[in-house]
Every structure is written in C-alpha cells, then in structure tokens.
Amino acid sequence: MRSTITSLVAGMLLTAGVGTASAAVIPVANGSFETLPAAGLPNPCGTGCSFSANDPVPGWTGSGGFGQFQPGPAAGNTTFFNTVPDGITVAYSNGGSLSQTVGAVAQAGVTYTLMVDLGFRKDALDNATAELVVGSNTIVNVLSATQNTGDWVTDTVTYTATAADAGAAISIILVSQGIQGDWDNVRLSDSLGTVAAPEPISLALLGPALGMLGLLRRRRA
C-alpha cells in the first residue's frame, strides 16, 4: 500500500513539473543560415538555385572561399542535394572555414554538445567537418560516410569542461578540407538543463500529494 501511495505521489509531483529537467540550448547566431547577406545570393546555379561568393555570412566569420547556398530541392532541382535539412539555405566553403564564438562561457563539469548537419554533394567529396572549441581544446569527430550521395548526416561533438576550462570561450568552427564542404542546422546545448516551474493548474496537485506524504509519516509513527 505504501509503495502504491509513494508512486502516486511521485507521479503527481512529476505532473506538477517538479524534478523535470532538459538540456539548455545555447543560442547560435544564424545557425540555419536562412539570414542572408545584404546583397542576397546573386549567383544563379539552376532552377531555384543560387549562391553567394565570399560575401559575409551573417553571424559568422569566414576565411578562404565561403558563402551561402540555396541548392534548389524546394524547386525540384536535385542536381546537388536530394533535400535540405532546415529551410532552403545552407553554408559552404571551398577549403576555408566559418567560425562563431557564442555568448556562453565554459563551466567546469558541464558537458557541451554540438550538432551540425553535414552535406555530401553529388559532385564533390565529403569535405565538411565541424569543430567544437572550448578554450584551448578543439574537439572534432570525423565521420566516415558514403561519398557523393546528395544526402545529409548529423555530426555530434561533445566535450565536458574541466576546472581549467572555467570561463573559457566556446566557439564553433565549420571546416572544409577541400572543395564544397556544406553545413546546415547548427545547434549547441549544455548539460546544465532547467528545472520546470510548476504551472498554475498543476499547483492544485501538490496539496493532495503532500497530504499523502503526511499520512504515510503518521502511519509509520
């Protein structure tokens, strides 16, 4: 009987939003690359397809050859990619990189997770990689995937900050090892999480729950 009541109380508390947590999202500027440069994407490349060349990518710092690219799957053009993961725009680089330092700084013991969709163009090698940089530590996960498929794969990079990393900057670097590295849907989170506050409608559940806990204590006495 006691275990049944205890389980019921735990369920009420969870319903009320007590003890629930989720990973905290760290904002990434223009992580989907849908914000275009002021000049737009002036270079045509087929039906529904256009790109920029060495124009600033909002939110990112570029080096080497880089730009934004709308490859055209939304218009039925699958010359380069079969789909686009998020929106209609991706970022690319020809042997260069795009980088961004986020607003958060490292905290000891916190795990940081970077997720980036890497594109494998039908007419190029798999040249895209993603790096998570925490202070002096650069973490990269080089994927081995079938080349020239026109599809995308999600690369996940994780790192748990040490005491020596506390207060260090956190950066994302998208690196192309050659012609046409492509990226989309860049997101970053940490393991701090947030405890959900009880919603007003859920507060009514706390009274019965606490009452049952009191009843259990009296019976044990």
Image (cartoon, grey):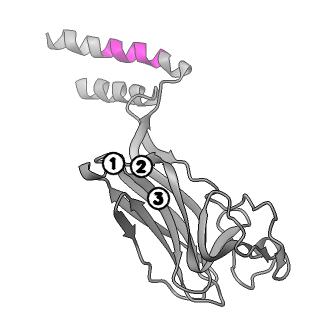
Disc 2 residue crowd, few under 14, some 14–19, many 20+, Cα 10 Å: many
Residue at left offset 40%, top offset 73% = 141
Q: What is the magenta range?
A: 204-212
Which residue has dot 2 on it? 190
Residue 193, compared with residue 188, is above or below; it is above
Please tell me the numbered disc located at residue 110: 1
Name the dominant secondary structure of the magenta segment. Answer: helix
Residue at left offset 60%, top offset 86% = 179
Residue in the foreground of this view, choosing between 174 and 209:
174
Residue 28 located within the stretch drawn in magenta = no
Q: Which of marks 1 and 3 is nearer the N terminus?
A: 1
Q: Earlier in the sequence, mark 3 or mark 2?
A: 3
Q: What residue type is labelled 2?
A: Asp
Q: Which of marks 1 and 2 is nearer the N terminus?
A: 1
Left or right of 77? Residue 122 is left
Which residue has dot 3 on it? 171
**Residue 14 x/y as whole percent:** 41, 31
Residue 210 located within the stretch drawn in magenta = yes
Residue 162, compared with residue 48, is above or below; it is above
Q: Which amino acid does label 3 sit on?
A: Ser
Between the C-alphas of marks 3 and 2, the distance is: 13 Å
Between the C-alphas of marks 1 and 2, the distance is: 7 Å
Residue in the foreground of this view, choosing between 155 and 197:
155
Residue 148, compared with residue 166, is above or below; it is below
Image quadrant where one finds the N terminus: top left
Hey, which quadrant is residue 120 in on the image?
bottom right
Left or right of 127? Residue 4 is left
Residue 97, compared with residue 121, is above or below; it is above
Left or right of 125? Residue 47 is right
**Residue 142 x/y as whole percent:** 42, 77
Q: Is label 2 in a helix, a strand or a loop?
A: strand
